[in-house]
Image (tube, rainbow, N blue to C red):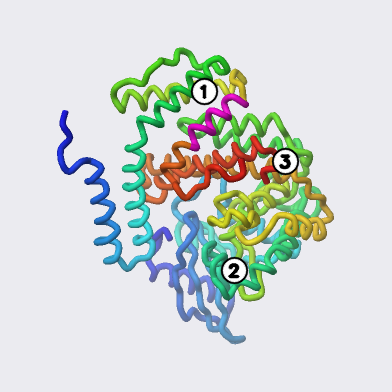
């Protein structure tokens, strides 16, 4: 967690906000949480007239990743997601400058469970939970993808703008191209994968809201399965198949390569559950294209991390992950070479 | 010039062992402990890469030369330059040209993919032995 405020200043600001928003409540304890490079997350325990209440304050951190949503934008997305029945903690009390000038923050309900990828996949007690996850996640994805630009609650989203040509594939290509062009020296593999994507568009061009980081690591999991979807900072308008494919991007299987969906499930039952829940057909060509797109996007993301190190952010993890871009490129090349059979 | 003893390789491995065995156990902070592991692994990876580097550079250059007919690469020399730095510079230049050729539509995608697969397979085998470069191809 980036240390951007002193604990006592944070506690004072949070206490003031709570007193303002929830008369009669008082702060019992605050606990900074780890994880999240672009946000400060602080757990807040309150005593209220109705009993104890545990919340999380989510605030903009000093440095963010360009192209991600700040907390104000995230708040807007969450409003729409909750309205569509998505299982995500509701956000409240959006505040400008709560913890720091210029930093938006909001409060949200605490979710109980485990989100860290390795823990979700390895904890023996979560065996039943893992079995329940595919159908639950399919249902949640269907709800997210029911949000479209032309109907409510999607029509009143201001945080992100749908592509003017209404084409999720062209929008995906534009986004990728812009990312690649910001690299100092794109590799030949990166250019080749991009070119293949541009020359072989998939069947579906439909635009819906997407979570944007729909993967193990952002699923809060408890004994009965999915407790909540987390981390909406990459949400935007795109193809629903982007979310369905991202969960299978190789790195997000946490080394459980034989379980392509999140490292815990197989493709066919997950896609079948999604078809059932969404009324949308899942063509493997769509999954295939967006999985290649996802592997490339993550490879470029890894290269950016190394670039950030070179530009002065001396975090060893950044330079280490830069080297791993080659793995995602290799996987994308494999998917290109094998076609849909490679899934 | 004769190599000083201990060698660079031995020094890098000693640094890795020091970080792993002496520093890491003495640290309570989980995030910092994890970074110690990363640091040790990076140093060891450098050792493995250095051992195979000249071989892989040669394979890559041969591949780029073979690709010359299918991609606008300019002049590709027959042999690798003598110094590490010159080799790295040459390969960077040629790869930049290949990237540009692919982007501009001046390269054969199939032939380029075959070449890139071979190069990445070789390098990944060294940088991440746990990565299965065969499965699914």
Label 3 and label 2 in one chain? yes
Question: Residue B114 magenta-drawn?
Answer: yes
Chain identifier of the residue bearing label 1 in the image? B
Whole-percent x, y for residue A110 in the image: 57, 72
Q: Quadrant of the N terminus of chain B?
A: top left
- State the SS at label 2: strand
Mark 3–mark 1 Cα distance, whole angstroms, equals 29 Å
Which element carries disc 3, helix, strand or loop? Answer: helix
What is the number of the mark on residue B98?
1
Q: Can residue B30 be seen in this view?
A: yes
Label 1 vs label 2, nearer the camera: 1
Residue range highlighted in magenta:
B110-121
Q: Are marks 3 and 2 in contact (CB under 8 Å)?
A: no
Q: Is residue A21 visible?
A: no
Tell me which corner region of the image, top left, top right, bottom left or bottom right, holds residue B37. bottom left
Q: Where is residue A201 in the image (x, y as percent from the top left)?
A: 73, 34
- Asked if residue A203 lies left or right of residue A221, the reply is right
Q: Is residue A122 magenta?
A: no
Q: Quadrant of residue A18?
A: bottom right
Mark 3, mark 1: which one is toward the viewer? 1
Residue named by callout 2: A108
Snapshot quadrant of residue A153: bottom right
Label 2 resides on the chain identified as: A
As drawn, the residue found furthest toward the top would be: B75
Residue A316: x and y, percent?
37, 50
Q: Is residue A40 above or below residue B46?
A: below
Q: Name the residue under label 3.
A: A168
* SS of the residue under disc 1: helix
């Amino acid at each position: 967690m980036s240390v951007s405020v002193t604990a006592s200043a944070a506690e004072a600001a949070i206490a003031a906000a709570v007193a303002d928003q929830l008369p009669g409540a008082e702060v019992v304890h605050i606990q900074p949480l780890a994880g999240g490079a672009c946000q400060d997350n602080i757990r807040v325990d309150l005593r209220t007239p109705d009993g104890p209440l545990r919340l999380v304050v989510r605030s903009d951190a000093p440095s963010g990743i360009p192209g991600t949503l700040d907390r104000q934008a995230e708040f807007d997305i969450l409003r729409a997601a909750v309205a569509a029945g998505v299982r995500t903690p509701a956000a409240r009390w959006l505040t400008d400058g709560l913890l720091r000038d210029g930093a938006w923050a909001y409060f949200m309900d605490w979710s109980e469970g485990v989100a860290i990828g390795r823990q979700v996949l390895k904890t023996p007690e979560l065996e039943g939970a893992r079995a329940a996850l595919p159908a639950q996640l399919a249902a949640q994805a269907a709800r997210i993808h029911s949000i479209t630009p032309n109907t409510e609650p999607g029509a009143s989203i201001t945080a992100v703008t749908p592509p003017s040509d209404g084409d999720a594939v062209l929008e995906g290509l534009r986004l990728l191209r812009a990312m690649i062009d910001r690299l100092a020296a794109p590799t030949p593999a990166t250019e080749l994968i991009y070119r293949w994507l541009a020359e072989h568009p998939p069947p579906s061009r439909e635009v819906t809201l997407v979570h944007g980081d729909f993967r193990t690591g952002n699923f809060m999991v408890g004994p009965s399965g999915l407790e909540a979807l987390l981390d909406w900072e990459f949400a935007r308008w795109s193809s629903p198949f982007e979310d369905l494919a991202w969960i299978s991007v190789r790195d997000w299987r946490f080394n459980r390569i034989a379980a392509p969906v999140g490292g815990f499930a197989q493709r066919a039952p997950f896609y079948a559950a999604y078809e059932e829940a969404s009324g949308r057909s899942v063509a493997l060509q769509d999954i295939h294209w967006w999985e290649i797109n996802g592997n490339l996007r993550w490879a470029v993301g890894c290269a950016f991390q190394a670039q950030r190190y070179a530009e002065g952010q001396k975090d060893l993890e950044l330079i280490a992950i830069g080297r791993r871009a080659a793995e995602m490129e290799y996987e994308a090349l494999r998917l290109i070479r094998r076609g849909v059979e490679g899934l | 010039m004769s190599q000083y003893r201990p060698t660079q390789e031995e020094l890098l491995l000693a640094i890795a062992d020091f970080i792993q065995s002496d520093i890491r156990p003495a640290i309570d902070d989980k995030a910092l402990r994890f970074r110690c592991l990363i640091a040790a692994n990076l140093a060891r990876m450098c050792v493995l890469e250095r051992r195979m580097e000249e071989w892989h550079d040669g394979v890559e250059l041969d591949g780029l030369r073979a690709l010359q007919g299918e991609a606008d690469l300019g002049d590709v020399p027959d042999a690798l330059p003598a110094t590490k730095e010159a080799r790295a510079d040459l390969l960077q230049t040629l790869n930049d040209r290949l990237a540009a050729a692919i982007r501009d539509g001046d390269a054969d995608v199939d032939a380029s993919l075959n070449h890139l697969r071979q190069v990445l397979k070789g390098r990944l085998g060294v940088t991440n032995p746990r990565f299965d470069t065969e499965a699914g191809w």
